[in-house]
Amino acid sequence: MPISLTRNFSIIAHIDHGKTTLSDRLLESTKTISDREKQDQLLDAMDLERERGITIKAHPVTMNYKAKDGKTYKLNLLDTPGHVDFSYEVSRSLAACEGALLLVDASQGVEAQTVANLNLAMQQNLHVIPVINKIDLPSADLDKCKRQLEDILQLPADEAVPASAKMGIGITDILEAIIRLVPPPKDPHDGYLRASVFDSVFDPYRGVVSYVRVMGGTIARGLKIRMMSTGLDYEVKEVGVFKPKMVATEKLHPGDVGYLIANVKSTADVKIGDTVTEMRHPAPTPLPGFKEIHPLVFSGIYPVSSEDFEALKMAVGKLQINDAAFTFMAESSAALGFGFRCGFLGLLHMEIVQERLRREFNMDVISTYPSVIYEVTKTDGEEMLVDNPCFLPPTQMIAEIREPMVKIFLMVPNEYIGDMMQLVMDKRGSVDHTETLDDNRVMLHCVLPLNEILVDFNDKLKSITRGYGSMDYEHAGYQASDLVKMDMLIAGEPVDAFACIVHRSKAESRGRALAGKLKEVIPQQLFVVAIQAAIGGKVIARESISALRKDVTAKCYGGDITRKRKLLEKQKEGKKRMKAVGRVNIPQEAFIEVLKTG
Ligand code: GDP
C-alpha cells in the first residue's frame, strides 16, 4: 500500500468524554474487530486501567478503511495514556502521528484535562480535528462547544465533526475527516532506517515487545538493529502490526506503526522515544525529542512484616520488568526496617504501583510520605539531588534549595473562583491569569510547587467545586524556595518515616497537624509519650499521650483460664501489626493515617 494511503492519528479526550466508546466504534465500523472479539479485548485490559478510566499503556491498532473515494486506507490509531504522569509517553505517541482527534463532550464542553495534551499535539505540529461527541444527549450544546473550541483552544470550529459514539452517529464523517485533513506520513528517502519507539511491554513468552513507528527505511525479521540512545545492538526476531491482536508481517515500511521483537531482556533496555536504526548502516542522527525519563516522586515502600522483605523484592523486580519508568533501590529505615526507595512519574503512577503490589502480589506494604526531588546547592558549592528528607544536609550547609514547580490549568464554575484562589494561595501557588470559558466557568492558569499538589489537591478541588472542577498540569522547572526538614520525635526518638521537607512558613501548622494526628493514632502506653515536631533541634509543636496501665486479664478474676489465654493471644495478634520505635509501639494505621495529613 502506498504511503499516501496511510494515516496515523490519536485521540485526545478528557476522561469520560467517550474515547473508549469512539475507539470501539472505529474498530467496529472498519471491521477490525467483531463483537465477540470486543468482549475479549475488554477482558484483556488491566483491571486497574478500567476501574480508573485511564490508559497506562499506549496500545496502537491498525484499521483498513474503504473511503468514499473508493480507495482503501490504512489508519493507525495510537492510544495515548490518559494522565499527565505519563506526559512524556503521550508526547512520544503523538510524535508518531500526523494528526489527532480532540474529543469534547457536547454536554460538558471543553475540560482542563484536554489542554495539556492539546499543547503537546500542537508542539508536534499535528493536525487537530475537533469531534463533538454525545450530541444525542438532550443537554448537548453544539454551538457552545464550537465557541469554546475557537475561543479557548483556537481550533477551527467549522472543521468540528458532530458525533455520538454511543449511537454510532458521525462515525463515517470522522473517518472521512481523518483522510481529508490528516496529512499522510512523509518518507524522507535518505537511505537510513529510523523508527521511533513509543512504548514497550513485557510478554512473559516473547520477551520485550517494542511499539514502533517507522519514519524512514524498513525493518524486517533478521535485520541487525541498533538502539541509538544505548548503542546496544539486537537482531529482529519478528515484526508485525496490531489488528488489534499482534499479527506478524514481512516488513514494516515508512509510515507504518507496529511492533518489533528482538532479543531484549528487560523493558529497561528499551527507552521510550529512542530511535531504532540499522546496525551496519546507522543513521547519522537520531529522531528528535528523546529524553531519559526520570522519576519525579519518591516514596519508601516497606513490608508490614519484616519476613516479607524477600517477597517484596521479587515483586518490585517483576513490576519493573514491565514498567521501565518505575525505579527502586534497597533502603532501610530505623522505624520501618528494610524496604525500597521507589521512584514514580507522579502520584497516580505511585498509586498504581502500590495497588498492583497489593492485588497482583498480595503484598501488605507501608509507604512513606511521598517526596519530590529537590535540587540542593551546598555552601561548599556541591550540587546534589535529594529525594528522601533524611538525606537533606543540615541547614547551615545549604546555600539554596530548589523545588519542582507545575503549571496547572483549573476549570471551575464561577461561584467557586474565590475558594479555589484561596486554595491555590494556601498551597503556595499563584494565579497567572484567568480566562472566561462560558457564562458559568473560568479557567485559572496557576503555578504551584509540585510538592503541594501531591497528596490532596485534586480531592480538595473536587470537594470545593462539588465535583464540577477539573484540572490538568504540566511541569514547569525548578524554583528556589525556603524549605526546611522537619523531624517528628516520638518519646524523644526521631522517626525517619515521618520526616518531611516543608516550606518554613508552613512548618508550624504542618507540625501541629502531624503531632495531633499521631496523638490520635498511637495507642496509650504504660508511660507518657511526648510527640514533637522539630526543625534542626528546635521544637515547633508538641503533644503528649497520657500513660495507661492496662491489664487485659484483670477482668477475668483469675478463674477462666481459656478466656484469659484468648485475650492474651488477641493482644499478641495486635502487637504483630505494630512497629516498635524505641520504646513505643506504633500501629500500621498510624503510618497510613499520617500520610493522609495534607
Ligand atoms: P473515556 O473515559 O473517554 O474512555 O469514555 P468512555 O468511552 O468510557 O465513555 C464514558 C461514558 O460516556 C460511558 O458511559 C459511555 O457509554 C458514555 N458515552 C460515550 N459516548 C457517548 C455518546 O455519544 N452519547 C452518550 N449519551 N453517551 C456516551
Image (tube, rainbow, N blue to C red):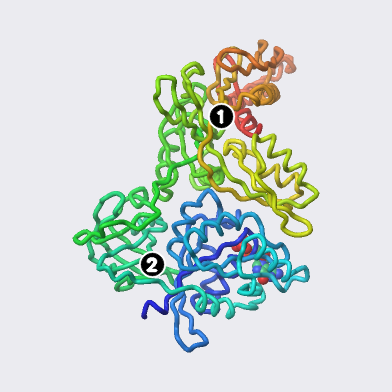
Q: In which quarter of the image is ligand 1?
A: bottom right
Q: In which quarter of the image is residue 555?
A: top right
Residue at the spot 75% in from the left edge and 69% down from the top edge? 141
Q: Is residue 259 above or below residue 169?
A: above
Furthest residue in direction right, as rendered: 415
The amino acid pointed to by label 1 is: Ser
Q: Mark number for residue 481?
A: 1
Where residue 331 appears, as percent x and y from the top left, is 43, 29
Which label sits in the foreground, 1 or 2? 1
Q: Is mark 1 on a helix, strand or loop?
A: loop
The amino acid pointed to by label 2 is: Gly
Q: What element carries label 2?
A: strand
Where residue 543 appears, as percent x and y from the top left, is 69, 16
Q: Mark number for residue 431?
A: none
Residue 195 in the figure: left or right of residue 410: left
* Alpha carbons under labels 1 and 2: distance apart: 46 Å
Residue 562 visible somewhere in the drawing: no
Quarter of the picture holding the N terminus: bottom left
Residue at the spot 63% in from the left edge and 77% down from the top edge? 168
Q: Quadrant of residue 582?
A: top right
Where residue 293 appears, as percent x and y from the top left, is 42, 46
Viewer-nearest residue: 182 or 16: 182
Q: Name the residue under label 2.
A: 258
Mark positioned earlier in the residue sequence (1 or 2): 2
Viewer-nearest residue: 443 or 40: 443
Residue 262 visible somewhere in the drawing: yes
Furthest residue in direction left, as rendered: 280
